Amino acid sequence: MAEPALDERNAGGAEPRPPRPWREPRRWLFAPWTVAVLYPVIALATTFWGAAAVALSAASRSVAFYCGTAWAWIIVRTSFVRIRVEGRERMARGQSYVILTNHQGDYDILALYGFLGREFRWVMKEELRRVPFLGWGCAAIGHIFVDRSNSQRAIASLEAAKPRLRGGISVVFFPEGTRSPDGRLLPFKKGGFVMARQLGLPILPVTISGSMRVLPKGCLFPRPGTVRVRIHPPLDAAAWATDAELVAAVREIVASGLDEAERRGRVGAGA
């Protein structure tokens, strides 16, 4: 199912309602737990598992990667968030992919890291490298940092990362480049698509739904909920004549996994 056109989104003259997380009673009811328990758990888990990843990376980056899995699992469980993954059988054992997924909020990262069941490397902004323990651990594992303000440096970072993507290790891109403010898909950037063509790797479209309801952009307090990760059938990038056609096809597939409120940008209080 394709994403509604812009004029369909605003049918009847009504603009999409922006998220209003501060009006949600469940978020306020959960706020004392967040401050007293969840925030300290995040701080401790990030410190412990970040340091563990740095230490273990000297022996094996693959082992160090699963420090991140433990870190994500602990935070998700402490948040009373459920992760539902559909379509794991579509990932062939030993096959590397370029995974392209939408970006609704911070729980996207936790859902993929803790529950995808596949070793991968993130493509993330350079600024995160300097975050204590979190950034240090990501650098030790071999995640890919790109300078988004300098396209030449970004391309060089992706080129240098190519040897890491073998033996079933995939790479994850958020092709929107940032979190959606209202659930709707933003335009897709081409970096991940170009990398798939250059490496001859299949593209694995993934849709994340519900993450924004748990913790939308600009909100400090998550609430319990369910995040669904839908893995779509892989695609051969060479089957499309142009990058523009490939981008449009993958974007439509990712959009098909969103619910109606997300497709129309109406994810708000009570949604």
Image (cartoon, rainbow, N blue to C red):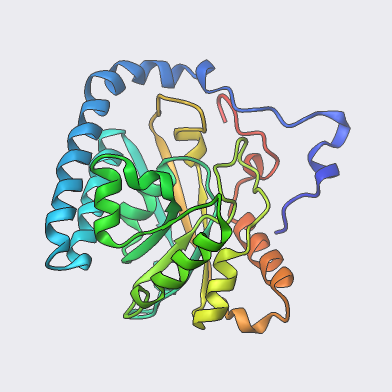
In the rendered image, the vertical position of residue 145 relative to residue 127, given as above or below: below
Task: Give residue 164's position: percent from left, percent from top.
Answer: 34, 73
For the question of whether residue 83 can be seen, the reply is no
Task: Give residue 106's position: percent from left, percent from top.
Answer: 43, 40
Front position in the image: 77 or 144: 144
**Count of numbered badges drawn on the protein:** 0
Q: Classify the position of the C terminus by image quarter.
A: top right
- Residue drawn 59% across and 72% down? 194
Q: Quadrant of residue 130?
A: top left
Task: Give residue 196's position: percent from left, percent from top.
Answer: 53, 75
Looking at the image, residue 242 sits to the left or right of residue 193; the answer is right
For the question of whether residue 245 can be seen, the reply is yes
- Residue drawn 53% across and 43% down? 104
- Residue drawn 61% across and 40% down? 183
- Residue drawn 43% across and 53% down? 124
Task: Give residue 215's position: percent from left, percent from top.
Answer: 45, 33
Looking at the image, residue 181 sits to the left or right of residue 200; the answer is right
Looking at the image, residue 24 sits to the left or right of residue 8; the answer is left
Q: Classify the position of the N terminus by image quarter.
A: bottom right
Front position in the image: 94 or 148: 148
